[in-house]
Amino acid sequence: MSKQRIWEILEISKENDKQSKVFDYFISILIGLNVVAIILETEKNLFGEYESFFRYFEIVSVLIFSAEYLLRLWSCVSVEEYQHPIFGRIKYIFSLMAIIDLIAIAPFYMTFIVTDTRIIRILRFLRILRVTKHSKYSTTFHIITNTIYKKRSELFSSLILMFSLLLICSTGVYFAENEAQPEKFSSIPSSMWWAVATLTTVGYGDIFPITSLGKLLGSISAIFGIGFFALPAGLLATGFSDEMEKAKTYCPHCGEKL
């Protein structure tokens, strides 16, 4: 089988390409099973009884993901963007999709190198990032990433506005409550926890103002939080709706009109 055909099966999902579709479904199911396995492993009784099964499933999954990664690296030169046999492959290695593939398998191999048990636990936790591989095979993920990319300037502006509001609220409540509650509002950074909980209207109740000025600031912060923190959601909702309409007439993978 030629490099071009391997690349088409692995990377390009055309409506009439059954082999590519089967591969996409297979990898998507395997990713889902990996996420389920990682979740079930945290049940000590279940993991203790089926430890061998979980270990073998992990090994088989990593071997499949590794083979997929190597095949992509081998066949990527069939694409004009990566056609150089050396620099083309280096360029592909540092592409977003290749990095996602590497993240899915790297923690497994690194556990053989690292001896610190704390780092190994972190690496095993990073296996959950395999779910990011699903973004390559899901139209919805493509729509979401396109939405975020196209609305990046508006989202960045809203984030700046949100951070400014967070800073103002945490500074104000610090000066209002520091004397009355020095152990809870000991500094502006520690007051940011209260500001985040208030502006997002979560209100955990572990830290709250008791002075009149502090309560006034808390009320204003909660009201402003409802409006300002809804800005990114509104931007994403509008962008997502536009991308969904576009996806009905254009292929999310190649961008060609259907």
Image (cartoon, grey):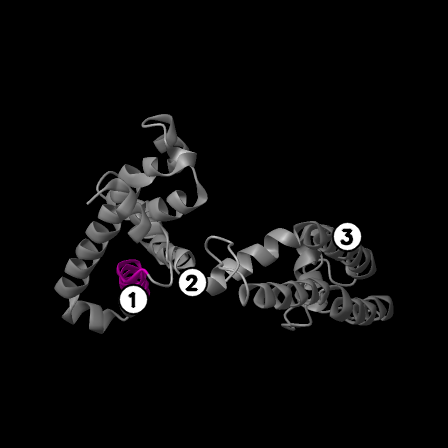
Question: Looking at the image, is mark 2 or mark 1 nearer the viewer?
Answer: 2
The magenta region covers 17-36
34 drawn magenta: yes
* Residue shown at the point (33%, 55%) measured from the top left: 127
Q: Amino acid at mark 3?
A: Ser
Packing grade of label 1 (10 A; few <14, some 14-19, many >=20) is few
Would you say the residues marked 1 and 3 are in contact, meaning their CB atoms lie under 8 Å apart?
A: no
- Residue 203 at x, y = what percent? 66, 72
What mark, if any, has residue 164 been given in the picture? 3
Q: Is residue 115 above or below residue 124?
A: above
* Residue shown at the point (74%, 51%) measured from the top left: 157
Q: What secondary structure do most residues of the magenta stretch adopt?
A: helix
- Whether residue 140 is visible to the viewer of this picture, yes or no, is yes
The quarter of the picture where residue 16 lies is: bottom left
164 drawn magenta: no
**Residue tagged by mark 2?**
138
Dot 1 or dot 3: first in sequence order is: 1
- Residue 239 at x, y = what percent? 65, 62
Q: Is residue 14 above or below residue 5?
A: below
Q: Is residue 77 above or below residue 71?
A: above
Q: Amino acid at mark 1?
A: Ile
Packing grade of label 3 (10 A; few <14, some 14-19, many >=20) is few
Q: Secondary structure at mark 2?
A: loop
What mark, if any, has residue 29 been given in the picture? 1
Packing grade of label 2 (10 A; few <14, some 14-19, many >=20) is some
Dot 2 or dot 1: first in sequence order is: 1
Marks 1 and 3, Cα distance to the nearest angstrom? 43 Å
